[in-house]
Image: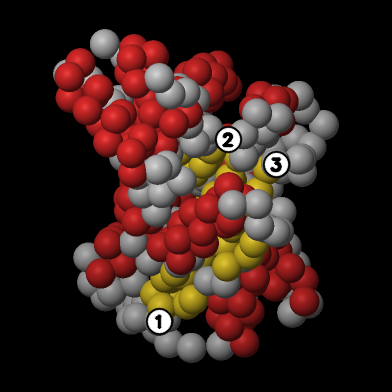
Amino acid sequence: MNIYDVSEKAGVSIATVSRVINGNSNVSEKTKLRVLSVMEELGYTPNVFARGLGLNTMKTIGIMCTDSSDIYLANAVYFLERELRFNAYDAILCCTGTSLENKMKYLNLLLSKRVDGIILVGSKFLSSSPDTSDNDYILRAATKLPIMLLNGQLSGNNIFSTQCDDESAVYSVTDKLIKNGQKNIVYLYTSTSYSGQNKLSGYKKALIDNHLIVNPVYSHMCTKSIARAKEYLNELYTNNIPFEAVVTSDDSLAVGAIKFAYEHSLNIPKDLSIVGYNNSVLANCTEPELTSIDSNVESLCVTAVKSLMKVFNGGEVPQRTVISADLIKRNTTNF
């Protein structure tokens, strides 16, 4: 038995059956009782597809992230799903990895499930090159449904972005360190994604505005690895390249800096100041506890879902919404 059988036997449209299933008040009591009676007679149990027919919505949002083991991305998925449930929406989560082929495959999968919108978590879904066609799969999908980018930026109709002001956050903390007397500042980062480029730009601008040379040896991209961060700092130390502070694009790299300082009996923050990013659980697990930039992932996700709900309701939503970050000062800095 399906919704079509119920419609035929009750003598009403499929849309009317769907309205009854969804509790829509725009159905007379007499019709509602007739439909419910037929459903009981036929033993019909509505599924999610049937519920979506009459309202032109499946009440389902697709969420895509590249790596669910990543602390930041896992937190973002949690907050997104929580907020979607609050708004009576279900979620389908796809963990894509980083290959373009898999990203395209999973995006098409979500489209085939007739989701109402898709949220791309993190800026690694976007190519860092502005002239590439690698973003076309997102632009094509946006012709069919709203796309929300979390910490990404792509111009196009029906594409919306909610992001943290990463550039200002890194600029501010680097500027504070410089004004506190730390002139040789190492910056460790994990990617050249949209977010990654903004963070690196903030670091460089702070140096330039304080009339310091942007020395490439002090900025280094490495994998999101505690060991790799420690290894690079050891390389600088072995080569007698001086540095008094380390700013990172992720707390895991900052943990590597703390382990480096411990290995060389450096006092934190007297000999070496260290700043992480994302204010993850790692920031409270180190000794001393880590000063970290809080990118306010919960606020970011709540804002993204609220914006998506406004889009569904025909409201005005800006193409780009920016959330400010907060510096959570602990014991690895003394400014």
Q: Which mark is residue 158?
A: 3
Q: Return the residue nearer the eye: 286 or 4.
A: 4
Residue tagged 2: 125
Q: Secondary structure at mark 2?
A: helix
Crowding around mark 1 (Cα neighbors within 10 Å: few <14, some 14 to 19, many 20+) is some
Q: Amino acid at mark 3?
A: Asn
Colour scheme of the picture: secondary structure
Residue 248: image location, x then y, percent: 49, 60
Residue 166 in sight in this render: no
Snapshot quadrant of residue 285: bottom left
Q: Is residue 192 left or right of residue 273?
A: right
Q: Which mark is residue 329?
A: 1
Of badges 1 and 3, nearer the viewer stands: 3
Regarding residue 28, the answer to whether it shows in the image is yes
Q: Residue at x 36, y 35 (%)?
A: 31
Residue 176 placement (x, y as % from top left): 58, 83
